Amino acid sequence: MTPRFTYRHLPPDAGDTDWRQALPVDWDAPVTDDQRLVGPANPWIPTRVALISPSLRHYLQCGEECLERANGPVSSIDPPRVIILSEAHADVLADWLDRHAAARNTDAEVHILSTNEDDETASRRLRRLCGSRDEDWRHGVFMEISGLGVLIRGAAGIGKSEVALELLSRGHRLVADDAPCFTAHGNEVTGSCPDRLFGLLEVRGIGIVDVGELFGSNALKVRKYLRLIVDLYPANAGRRIGANERLFGDRGNERVAGQSIPVWRLPVAPGRNLAVLLETIVRQRNLERQRGGEPTSPRIARLFADGEIPPHPGEKPEPWS
């Protein structure tokens, strides 16, 4: 059977009122503990409002799987079903519907929206609209690395699961793959995994592996405080790295479940040992926390005591005048 559709593109200047008008009635009705109200599309988790980013659209090839499984096992959630194409222009929505609106599905109406906002911005808006700020779902692999809760993120296929496997083989622990849930507890953010996915890791080319069977129960952690986000991105993506980023790391901050979490961006290239690099970042972060947030050791600080940043070895100094 062919599903019924409503669809609308929300322009960049769309405000909360526009979003409320575009969303169906009862989209924010309470869900049960094993369901999500808002989160990235995942075929295994019932999700009322499923977000599909450009990388996920490419990974799923925007085929029937997007429509049939974006909201997870839809038989276990009440309508309405909502699919949001993030970072999408109006023509992306039109093309997507033109190619895939004939996909077979349940007889439930599917409400499809597109927006220029990314997953995280749209998620924050939706949580604000429904009055929920203390729970946040993010796409990535959440691990305990050297005692620190680290969310490893990146586009589909960049190598998150592979580096997770290597980290597991080095004695670190998995909390959640693909769809960790983060909840605010005072000034802390705790990450955990949906029950049906706990202990499972999807690795491209291998499939879904049972981490407990392969590495033992000590390789799993039920929940962990989120202390750091590491974003993996292709080294040839054209991201400009300035002097400060080169010397002190490409860093930033991001709000998760209402709390500010440090972010470290790491370029991925052939031959780079990501597990070692991630372990180094975690060690660095642990040392910084012990120093009360000071990002540099006393030795490194002395290098810049005069306020000057030395040139990169590959950079030619300015000619003498």
Image (cartoon, grey):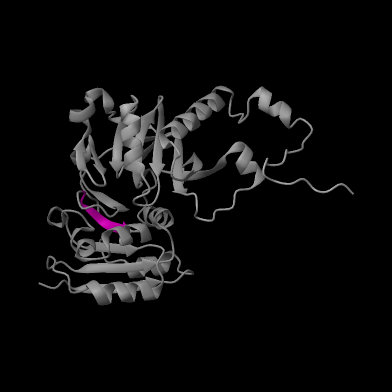
The residue that appears at 32% across and 57% down in the rendered structure is 56
Quadrant of the image containing the N terminus? bottom left
Q: Residue 132, image x and y in percent?
A: 36, 49
Q: Residue 39, image x and y in percent?
A: 31, 52
- 297 part of magenta stretch: no
* Between 146 and 185, the one nearer to me in the picture: 146
* Between 7 and 297, the one nearer to me in the picture: 297
Q: Is residue 182 visible?
A: no
Q: Is residue 216 visible?
A: yes
Image: magenta residue range: 45-51
The residue that appears at 22% across and 34% down in the rendered structure is 199
Q: Residue 238, image x and y in percent?
A: 54, 56
* Between 27 and 156, the one nearer to me in the picture: 156
Residue 263 position (above or below residue 306)? below
User: Which quadrant of the view contains residue 77?
Assistant: bottom left
The residue that appears at 29% across and 38% down in the rendered structure is 176
* Between 249 and 197, the one nearer to me in the picture: 249
Q: Residue 131, image x and y in percent?
A: 37, 52
Prevalent SS, magenta region: strand
The residue that appears at 77% across and 36% down in the rendered structure is 307
Is 237 displayed left or right of 309 in the figure?
A: left
Residue sitting at the far right: 321
Is 229 displayed left or right of 139 in the figure?
A: right
User: Which quadrant of the view contains residue 202?
Assistant: top left
Residue 105 position (above or below residue 133)? below
